[in-house]
Amino acid sequence: MAAPKPAPRRNDSAALAKEIAEKLTYAIGKDPATARRHDWLEATTLAVRDRIVDHWLASNARNNASGAKRVCYLSMEFLIGRLLRDAINNLGLSEAIRDALSAYDVEIDLIELLEPDAALGNGGLGRLAACFMESMASTGVPGFGYGIRYVHGFFRQEVVDGQQVELPETWLEHGNPWEFERRERAFEIGFGGKVTMIEEAGKPPRQVWRPAERILAVAYDTPIVGWRGARVNTLRLWSARALDPILLDAFNSGDHIGALLEANRAQSITQVLYPADSHLAGQELRLRQEFFFSSASLQDIIRHHLKRHGDLTTLPDKVAIQLNDTHPAVSVAEMMRLLIDVHAMGWDQAWDITKKVFSYTNHTLLPEALETWPVNLFERLLPRQMQIIYAINAQIIREATQSGLDGGKIAAISLIDEGSGRRVRMGQLAFVGSHAINGVSALHTELMKKTVFHNLHELYPERIQNKTNGVTPRRWIMECNPDLTALVTEAIGPGFKDDITKIKGLDALATDAGFRDKFMAVKLRNKQRLAKTIEERLAISVDPHAMFDVQVKRIHEYKRQFLNIIEAVALYDQIRSHPEIAWQPRVKIFAGKAAPSYANAKQIIHLANDVARVINADPSVQNLLKVVFLPNYNVSLAEQIMPAADLSEQISTAGLEASGTGNMKFAMNGALTIGTLDGANVEMLEHIGEDNIFIFGLTAEQVAARRANGQGGREIIENSPILKGALDSISHGVFSEPGRYSNLIDNLYGNDWWMIAADFEAYWQTQRRLDTVWQDPTAWGTKAVHNTARMAWFSSDRSIREYAKDIWSAPTGA
Ligand code: 26M
């Protein structure tokens, strides 16, 4: 990692106290006597921001001077969460700020909580983008995030009568001190209209797109501080605005209302994040969002390159553009349009440059989540880009024909799906326009080659690579688990903060009773804090000495929260009918949001809440089982939950979870995992060792085979009294009126698509094995320490270094 630049200011708490007080006085207009907590948050944020800006300007100057290759990460989502603690930690100011504020009797831990989460993402994909931004800054990659400045991020979830209710999220309500509006950095974005051929004397004919509608994309920049402030990168988010001249025209001609409507229509593009992560929204507004931020980002990249280097032929030497899933895939066509129509480049050269510049990450194989757009919608909204897609398609089909692929295979790789009413396949577009395509875990990458991209892989066998996900240890160990960080520092020194691989030094201490006790004491304190939150929010009292068994993530059938709930019900039945068995006390904790239109996922939330209400009120299991559904799961709640978990549930149907990243956060914080051989669990098993992780269930291959056989769950259920009993209590109305969940249950008897019946017995047995381990605190503690010690490879620093080397050819500091 690059040596830290000497900070230009003094880092002592007295200097910071003065800076904060000055902000309070001159930026906020309050004095310490009248300031409220919010004012202190704002003053502290502004003081910290000044420190960041010093480093930011230095980083940008260094980039420009060196001319090093820049990495542009295009993502519809950045699920950042809060930024203050991240900034303070990475600048090494934690103690100084604490002391500075305590001089005014202000507790940093309390004011931090007032910062709203920047929830500009749905889940894994958006959070990965946020971890990658932090790791690029920490490993010395000149990284630029490009995305959308949604006015309303991911909805706030409330649970009313056991059911999810969605409420608007308003993170910008009190302003956003982290962002810098760049009014001068604005680009025109077109929609609709016509394409005409222009023929000028002495020049080759060219196509010109005359959009019917034009709006403005305005940049808002947020600095992203790396570890030790060594580098500060930029997250540039685009906001939509009406084009001023149109507005003026309309005003001048007296059409006041018309002008305002136009402005509203323009602004609607960046109003709201689509809250779907696993099925297609399909609305025109979504395609507008995708093109809006893609075009703005590419225009910005080209402008910058021309200013610095003068000539677009060198673009691939100076810029790498990573497409975070297919959401920005229209960039491939838009880049071609900009190069050919606007910058007068020939097709072959433009195509060569495009492929060298772009690379694409796939995050899901679920067929219902693969993006396609109706050709006629595409044509109406983006007529020139549609022409270019046709031209790319013709070229790919030529290449396929030349290499001897047969007709069926050619239809499969075509960018146009002729099957279901002619649709543009965004995955295919992203693939053919990129020199590298990656999956996010070893298993997922292999499945990509075998399934969705089978034929394209055959045609371009060197393009698909694996880049297993990671998470940033700054946020997901140091910041969310300060007690663990202090303990690790005491045990092996602070070196792991600069180089997480050093945390392996803990491995030898797993069998050291003194260390293990301290490790489990940290866990207990974290559990006590979470228990307090549960008590405050839900008025449920849970025993911090019970096993905290946690499943937090988006609610989806493939993630199988239903399997976990059925196990809770089965446990409830068995505890009551077999009081002689040494059951171990457990708290089952759930959290997560369902897509508003996903009926089955909402039913699962309802069921979890119904089951929780009945079990928590039953005195016969009081000390042995509690069920908790914590509403409004977000990054900040995750930061509280991960350090407090004993057991991490990673139980997706094998072959369906591309990677998972929550699995990594839990294990780093010393939770054991119960999981299937899916996504990154497979690689976690390799790193942690089979004695320290609890794997069960069908493999991806077995799932595929069972699905092909169409076996269904009836026979299994009839032969499993425990499962049958649990399903019967759900059906017969132990937790609700009878029949409320008959749809969910009928699905298990029917095709059991998600293999819940098929995997139940293995899951149940593995949970009971975990009970046995829990009974032996030495055994559990040893495994927990091994988990923390052996997870370093899952740092997003490692992921980013692999991308930089194998895909981007970009520099890292180390
Ligand atoms: C698509 C169209 C319209 C509206 C929304 C979407 C959409 C948004 C988010 C589709 C998918 C989205 O996210 C998918 C996702 O989060 N995938 C997860 O990515 C993680 C990071 O690689 C993996 O760890 C998870 O396994 C994977 O599910």
Image (cartoon, grey):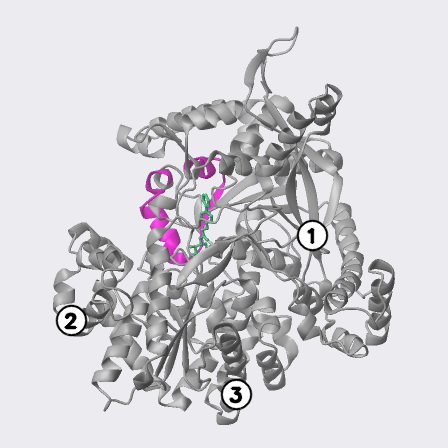
Q: How many marks?
A: 3
On the image, the x and y values in percent for residue 773 come to: 34, 85
Most foreground residue, 130 or 401 = 130
The magenta segment is: 428-456
Q: Amino acid at mark 1?
A: Thr
For marks 2 and 1, the one nearer the N-term is: 1
Q: Name the residue carrying label 1.
A: 222
Which quarter of the picture shows residue 671?
bottom left
Disc 3 versus disc 2: distance between alpha carbons?
39 Å
Report the disc number at residue 720.
Answer: 2
Most foreground residue, 776 or 316 = 776
For disc 1, the neighbor class at 10 Å (few under 14, some 14 to 19, many from 20) is: some
Question: In the rendered image of this protein, does residue 92 appear above or below residue 703?
Answer: below
**Residue 439 inside the magenta-drawn segment:** yes
Select label 2 or label 1 by which is in front.
2
Q: Amino acid at mark 3?
A: Ala
Answer whether labels 3 and 1 touch (C-beta < 8 Å): no
Q: Name the residue carrying label 3.
A: 521
On the image, the x and y values in percent for residue 423 come to: 38, 30
Disc 2 versus disc 1: distance between alpha carbons?
55 Å
Task: State left or right for residue 12 relative to residue 550.
Answer: right
Q: Which image quadrant: the C terminus?
A: bottom right
Q: Amino acid at mark 2?
A: Ser
Which quarter of the picture shows residue 162?
bottom left
Query: Measuring 70% from the left and 22% from the top, which residue is drawn there?
Result: 250
Disc 3 versus disc 1: distance between alpha carbons?
38 Å
Report the disc number at residue 508.
Answer: none
On the image, the x and y values in percent for residue 391 come to: 46, 23
